[in-house]
Amino acid sequence: MQKFVNAIWYPSNKPSLMFMLLRYLLLPLSVLFFLVSTARRYLFKVGVNQAISLPVPVIIVGNITVGGSGKTPTVIYLIELLRKQGLRPGVISRGYGIEFDGVRVVEPGMDTSEVGDEPAMIVARTGVAMVIGADRVSAAKELIKRGDVDVIISDDGLQHYKLERDIELVILDGERRLGNGALLPAGPLREGAWRMGHVDFVIVNGEAHHDEYQMALAPSGLKAVAPGNLSTFEQQTATAIAGIGNPQRFFNTLAQEGYLIDKTHAFDDHQAYTAEVLSQVVGDAPVLMTEKDAVKCRDFAKDNWWYLAVDAKLSSTFESKLMDKVHSVIEQKKGKSDGI
């Protein structure tokens, strides 16, 4: 399904007539989406709906497109950057595909069925204090109440206007960028391209344009998926799988790193894995996967399954400008207790 939708949203240089027709048939729904989203933003702008302010800086890491762009590596990067500056970040997120009432604290080792794949991955990698919930304001308040947190990072939530934000980062896939430029469902956009002109930083996972900041995802080596497996990967032919927004980017990275891949299989983003599902695809072959896939396979991983960890890299110029904004917001909020 994801492959079919991407053919409409991210057409090739010579798109087929069928996909062009489907896009035009979906445009009336995109107009309806535009009217609803515009009305919602307007209600917040005029004060009919109230945005809730928090006593600590809130950094939104989001995008205006549907699908993977590199938000999770960016969140991990920000956690590490803020810690180096002596700050104590916490993270909030929706918890994609997880249905529950209220908010939920993410603890190390929790199953992805309880908290979602990205929260599980973030906490496994960093041990950061994290709370998930559909209402990000409630999640943020719980995070502040429970932990020693002086900066909040929101994993996604650019369109969650109920939460007042101090710094906005938009993450963009440098290969796909804005796709066909249409709003949902005819295109991948949650908001129009104009939105990028109203955020603090546009970070591009790939080649950046003027006034954008380039991010590189640097591989940091293969690690065993199975907990406790301390063996190292020996160069051999393997099968590659990926259940992320842009699987081909991962497959290209493996090729660039010199890994020998005889077969690739792209799953839908946030794919729920089972031992049976994967055995049908990979058999007994060595498997290479993403870190986000790995957290969903820990309980049934074989000894020849590995994941490629990646680290986001940004310029010192970006780091300096971001930290200037963070410290400025901290000074403005000293002594305030709004929203708590």
Image (cartoon, rainbow, N blue to C red):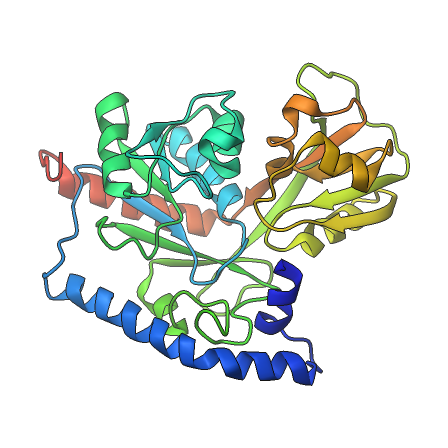
Residue drawn at the location 69% of the way across and 26% of the way down = 225
* Residue positioned most to the front: 276
Residue 192 placement, left or right of 244: left
Dividing the picture into quadrants, the one containing residue 192 is: bottom left
Viewer-proximal residue, 173 or 46? 46
Dividing the picture into quadrants, the one containing residue 86 is: top left
The image position of residue 17, as x and y in percent, is 67, 85
Dividing the picture into quadrants, the one containing residue 91 is: top left
Residue drawn at the location 73% of the way across and 17% of the way down = 229
Residue drawn at the location 49% of the way across and 48% of the way down = 71
Residue drawn at the location 64% of the way across and 22% of the way down = 299
Could you tell me which quadrant the C terminus lies in? Answer: top left
Does residue 158 lie above or below 309 as drawn?
Answer: below
**What is the count of numbered marks?**
0
Could you tell me which quadrant the N terminus lies in? Answer: bottom right
The image position of residue 183, as x and y in percent, is 43, 72
Does residue 17 lie above or below 310 as drawn?
Answer: below
Does residue 307 lie above or below 166 as drawn?
Answer: above
The image position of residue 45, as x and y in percent, is 16, 65
The image position of residue 253, as x and y in percent, is 73, 49
Viewer-proximal residue, 59 or 62? 62
